[in-house]
Each structure stands twice: as C-alpha cells, then as structure tokens.
Image (cartoon, helix red, strand yellow):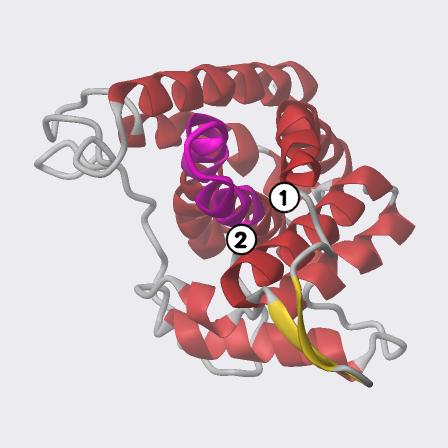
Amino acid sequence: MDTEGRPYIEFTDMEWTSTRHVDPNVLSYWSIVSLSRALRFKEEACNLQGVSPVFSAVATYYSLFHLGIFLMYCMPQKVHSDDKEVKKEEKRILHKINAALKNGTNDPRKAVSHEDVCKYLRKRQSDSLPKEVVISLEKAKKLREFVNYGPDLIHTPDGFRVLNRAHDPSECSELIEQLDTLFCMAVTWLCENAAEEDRLLIPISIETGGRFFTSNPDGEAYYSQWSPPEVLRKAELLRVHLFKIAERLIT
C-alpha cells in the first residue's frame, strides 16, 4: 500500500522495449483493473436488462471483453513465447502491449483490439479454455455491433428495406443468465493452467479489486460515482466468490 492506502505492486527497474517479454508483475497490476471492469459491466448488464436492451447488450459484451483481457494479463506466457512455431500474430500482440506499457506505468488496454482478445481466447481453447467462454464472447460481440450500428438497410428488388430482425433481445438475456458461470469457468481454467510463476498473482489481483466496489482507505468505492449501490454490491459478491475459487485452487 502507498501512503494513502492505495494498492500497488512494486516494479523492478527495467528497460522496456517493444520486443521484450511482458513481466507478469506489471500486467498483474493492470489485471486488477480489467477484472473490476468486467465485474462492473456484468452487473450493469443485469441491472439494465429490463430497462434498456440496447445498453444491456453493450454491457454484456464489455463484461466478457474485459474478462478476456484479464485472462490475457494473467497468462502473459501465452502471449509471448520463444517457440519458433508461434505465429507472428501473437508476437504482434506482445509487441503492442509492451510498447503501450511505457515502463509499466500505463494501462496497455488501448493496444489490445477487440479482435486481439477474440483471437487470443480462440487459441487458448487448445489449452483447454472452455469453448463456452469463446462462443459467448463472439455472440456478445455480434449483439453489441447490431445494437450499436443496426438496424441496417439492405437493397432488394423492391428498393431499400430495413433489416432489424437479425437479432432479438432474448439472445442477450440468455447470455446474461450464463455470465456468472462463465466468470467462474474462466477463473477456474486460469488457476489450473497459468504458469507457476504467474499463479500466485491471480488471487492477489482478484482480492485487490474489492476496492472498486466497497469503501476503502481512499473513501468510497472507486466505482461509486458511476454505478448504483446494487450493482456494486452484486459485483462484490461475485468478486468474493471468484477469490474463493482462486484461493482454493492455488493456495
């Protein structure tokens, strides 16, 4: 903790370049934020479900997107590799993350595209990542794109017509019902498959995220100005549950 009680991870003095491997200690710091975003969006999706299917669909997607980034940050050894068979695509993602870190002080999230996360998770299926996590992210991505950019115009022999039936709000509801299970599956897989040197950081990251949802030495929960109390309460409940899973599997 720093003098104001904020959590931090000490970084050793290193020179960072776009070609070096990512230090798991550095990415662990940003994984705290990524999981907190995922949990907050997950509960916002639930909260908005009966109010605005549009914003609920957007929040559903971002909950899974940030969950994917959390997995990526907690398993940097799967992003970088000395294996000559590793495709250039994975090395490209590694280079972008390293460059964006700026000596470990910047959140590299903007360097990771939506498609980067999808590709990373697809490849992790070969490491036994449950396919449900990948399928759900891809479904949520399609729904988010539909509500953001649809309905679309299509040209027919009778002229332009509005295409607004490609998806239904019930598809989002089905995804939301699965989110708790998907988060638990993802964290279980992570704890069972992360490299030995990364595993101990996982429960620390999950535990430290509590400050985003509950009062702490800095004052109110970090998300208290943007999310209602019920969203924070439920996000914290799931965070605690995920921490217990990680604690049981790792410590």
The image position of residue 69, as x and y in percent, is 56, 53
Nearer to me, 36 or 189? 36
Give amino acid for label 2: Pro
Q: Are marks 1 and 2 in contact (CB under 8 Å)?
A: yes
Marks 1 and 2 sit apart, C-alpha to C-alpha, by 8 Å
Residue 120 falls in which quadrant of the image? bottom right
Give the dominant element type of the magenta stretch: helix, strand or loop: helix
Give amino acid for label 1. Answer: Glu
On residue 197, which mark appears? Answer: 1
Q: Mark 1 falls on what kind of element?
A: helix
Instruction: Please tell me whether mark 2 sits on a helix, a strand or a loop.
Output: helix
The image position of residue 17, as x and y in percent, is 47, 82
Q: Is residue 44 magenta?
A: yes
Q: Which residues are magenta?
A: 40-62
Q: Residues within 10 Å of mark 2 (few under 14, many from 20)?
A: some
Q: Is residue 187 visible?
A: no
Query: Who's the residue at 26% across and 20% down the image?
Result: 229
